Image (tube, rainbow, N blue to C red):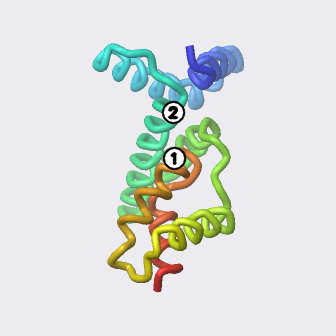
Amino acid sequence: MSQLKTKLQDDLKEAMKNKDNFKRDVIRFLMSALKQIEVDERKELSDTDIVKIIQKSLKQRDDAAIAFQEAKRDDLYEKEIAEAAILKSYLPQQLSDEELKTIIQKHIQSSGATSLKEIGKIMARVLTECEGVADGKRINAIAKELLV
């Protein structure tokens, strides 16, 4: 069993002991999503797979939070933000903007890209290298900034 899945199970037990129903429910929801994928694909999930699922769930929370904020539903907005904070705690430490700029600059130089038309070459390489530790939107924004 993966380390991340073990940590989730331990945190679920801890939340149940502490009667932290909100955290318990968030972890249960995540665990059920993991179980569903394991059953559907008939495979044991690795930590990398679990991180991808958490990132997908986090993106859903962020999108929902934005929608609730625009609809002036502050109660639901706060709930989505709190759920996102719990999910973020299971992700690896994200790269800083400076670290990301260094990596992107390295790939720009190695590929010889000079314009925004060539951003696809850079994005593919950087996404592969920064998988799980940087969001695609951040990578894209920094790459555009460096290529302009």
User: Which residue is label 1 attached to?
Assistant: 131
Residue 73, above or below 144:
above
Taking depth in this image into account, of 11 and 76 the one nearest to the observer is 11
Name which of mark 1 and mark 2 comes first in the sequence. Answer: 2
Q: Given the current orientation, which residue lies at the most extreme left position?
A: 40
Q: Do the residues labelled 1 and 2 touch (CB within 8 Å)?
A: yes
Residue 54 screen position, x and y as percent: 48, 37
SS state under label 2: helix
Taking depth in this image into account, of 18 and 38 the one nearest to the observer is 38
SS state under label 1: loop
Task: Name the quadrant of the N terminus.
Answer: top right
Give the label on residue 48, or none.
Answer: 2
Give the label on residue 67, or none.
Answer: none
Q: Which residue is drawn at 36% across and 66% down?
A: 120
Question: Amino acid type of disc 1?
Answer: Glu
Taking depth in this image into account, of 48 and 81 the one nearest to the observer is 48
Q: Given the current orientation, which residue lies at the most extreme bottom position?
A: 148
Q: Which residue is drawn at 63% across and 51% down?
A: 94
Residue 97 screen position, x and y as percent: 64, 66
Q: Which residue is drawn at 61% across and 69% down?
A: 101
Crowding around mark 2 (Cα neighbors within 10 Å: few <14, some 14 to 19, many 20+) is few
Residue 27 screen position, x and y as percent: 53, 26
In terms of image quadrants, where is residue 122? bottom left
Q: Which residue is drawn at 45% across and 53% down?
A: 62
Q: Is 117 on the left-hand or right-hand side of 100?
A: left
